[in-house]
Image (cartoon, rainbow, N blue to C red):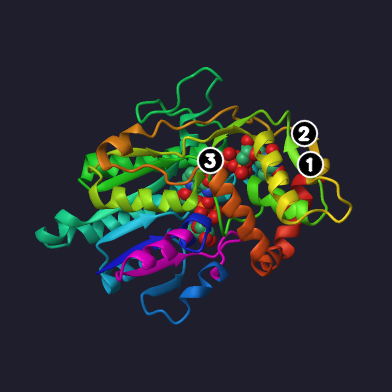
């Protein structure tokens, strides 16, 4: 048996592929366009492993996806492929519309054709799992209860709007065509192989390079942090036993203001890699202009997935962030290689 994973060279996708193959003998076909965010080095430990079949390509390439489905006959498709960075979506939304909306549409069309041609026995076990975000629900006030699956969609950035549109398409393919879909909406992930344009890895690599730690606005925006390996285990559970057509919120029960996260990272670095001048990395914190339309707070109510599928995160924020900081200290080559020319161009554009 085989599964098809899209975007499996990105942050969460690569963690998922590694996690999947650590738990199962079932092969993974990994379709990834290798944009700036895709990195085969994250999958280097799978070199020569016949269970991992990497294909460079676009989820919007209908003939390629059709061919992969026929050739590999997967029993499930898990869609991670997306443009995922809010700040980039503010500078240039078009790629987000293309991949997250148009690409998901083409992928759904290919999967619908494949599904319709499956024999009845295989139809009943086939699944299309769409990985989405809590950002589709918009922003919470400090007193509001966390997002449940019943919250209305109120996306605020081009990124979250494009993910919301893709969620709606996935839902419609279930209601209209009977495609057996599942959707997960998760909170901010962190952990190994996280591209250092996102806050946590950016702060770690900037701190070690002696650079400023750029906190947007007053640093009081709140995110609900989920260790990436917990997210992977949640996806496996939803794929296994999720109810068709349902959405599941996945969160870490770890709401933290950004400034607290940055200070925690500084404290861990002070402990594991003290600065040569004896000062704290916290001295490098710099408040910079806020993100336009910056969502104040995200928080996930993850009780449905716990109640129905008996899933709970296993890491606390303290254990997960310690593992993450240590991973970045031990994987400096991976970091050095992702900081290529295009990465430097982005940093200049965003922070100059
Ligand atoms: P990422 O940006 O690190 O990786 C995305 C991957 O998709 C890359 O490998 C890229 O090459 C690939 N890709 C992009 N466009 C493609 C296309 N048209 N065809 C094929 N491949 C393409 O993103 P991530 O952080 O790993 O996020 C994975 C998924 O999880 C996304 O759908 C994202 O919206 C969702 N999500 C992420 C987070 C988070 O905190 N990172 C939180 C909630 C939801
Ligand atoms: P990010 O990692 O980009 O995830 P998202 O925007 O999807 O939540 O940002 C997390 C939080 O950190 C968000 O509130 C914006 C803030 N942030 C900074 O303060 N400085 C930075 O340099 C970055 C990249 C983000």
Q: Which residue is outermost to the left?
A: 120
- Residue at horizontal 23%, vertical 43%? 244
> Relative to residue 307, is residue 119 depicted above or below?
below
In the image: residue 63, left or right of residue 115: right
Work out how far the residue at label 3 is from the one at label 1, CA to CA, in angstroms: 21 Å
Q: Which residues are magenta?
A: 15-40
Residue 289 circle label: 2
Q: Is residue 243 left or right of residue 226?
A: left
The secondary structure type at the circle numbered 2 is loop
Judged from the image, the quadrant occupied by ligand 2 is top right
x 48%, y 79%: residue: 47
Q: Secondary structure at mark 1?
A: helix
Q: How far apart are the alpha carbons under marks 3 and 2?
A: 23 Å
Q: Residues within 10 Å of mark 3 (few under 14, many from 20)?
A: many
Q: Are marks 2 and 1 in contact (CB under 8 Å)?
A: no
Q: Earlier in the sequence, mark 3 or mark 2?
A: 3
Q: In the image, is residue 158 above or below residue 46?
A: above
Residue 82 at least partly seen: no
Q: Earlier in the sequence, mark 2 or mark 1?
A: 1
Disc 3, disc 2: CB below 8 Å? no
Badge 2: how crowded within 10 Å, few (<14), some, or many (20+)?
few
Residue at the extreme bottom of the image, as rendered:
48
Q: Residue 109, how many percent across, how many down?
A: 31, 54
Separation (CA) of disc 2 from disc 1: 19 Å
Residue 282 magenta-drawn? no
What residue is pinned by disc 1? 282
Graded by Cα atoms within 10 Å as few (under 14), some (14 to 19) or many (20 or more), the crowding at tag 1 reads some
Disc 3 vs disc 1: which is toward the camera? Answer: 1
Residue that appears at 64% across and 67% down: 334
């Amino acid at each position: 048996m085989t599964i098809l994973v899209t975007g499996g060279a990105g942050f969460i996708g690569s963690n998922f592929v590694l996690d999947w193959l650590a738990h199962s003998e079932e092969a993974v076909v990994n379709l990834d366009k290798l944009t700036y965010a895709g990195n085969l080095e994250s999958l280097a430990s799978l070199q020569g492993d016949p269970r991992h079949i990497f294909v460079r390509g676009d989820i919007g390439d209908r003939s390629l996806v059709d061919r992969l489905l026929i050739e590999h006959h997967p029993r499930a498709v898990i869609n991670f492929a997306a443009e995922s960075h809010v700040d980039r979506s503010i500078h240039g939304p078009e790629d987000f519309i293309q991949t997250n909306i148009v690409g998901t549409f083409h992928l759904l069309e290919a999967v619908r054709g494949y599904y319709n041609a499956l024999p009845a026995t295989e139809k009943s076990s086939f699944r299309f799992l769409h990985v989405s975000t809590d950002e589709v629900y918009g922003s919470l006030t400090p007193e509001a209860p966390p997002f449940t699956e019943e919250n209305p969609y109120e996306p605020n950035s081009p990124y979250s709007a494009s993910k919301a549109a893709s969620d709606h398409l996935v839902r419609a393919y279930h209601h209209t065509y009977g495609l057996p879909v599942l959707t997960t909406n998760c909170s901010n992930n962190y952990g190994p192989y996280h591209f250092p344009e996102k806050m946590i890895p950016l702060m770690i690599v900037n701190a070690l390079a002696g650079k400023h730690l750029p906190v947007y606005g007053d640093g009081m925006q709140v995110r609900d942090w989920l260790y990436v390996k917990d997210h992977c285990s949640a996806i496996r559970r939803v794929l296994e036993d999720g109810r068709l057509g349902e959405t599941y919120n996945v969160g870490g029960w770890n709401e933290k203001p950004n400034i607290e996260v940055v200070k925690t990272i500084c404290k861990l670095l002070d402990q594991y890699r003290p600065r040569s001048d004896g000062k704290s990395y916290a001295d490098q914190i710099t408040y910079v202009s806020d993100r336009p339309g910056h969502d104040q707070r995200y928080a996930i109510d993850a009780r449905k997935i716990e109640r129905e599928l008996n899933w709970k995160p296993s890491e606390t924020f303290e254990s997960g962030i310690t593992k993450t900081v240590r991973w970045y200290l031990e994987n400096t080559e991976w970091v050095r290689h992702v900081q290529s020319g295009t990465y430097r161009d982005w940093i200049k554009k965003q922070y100059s």
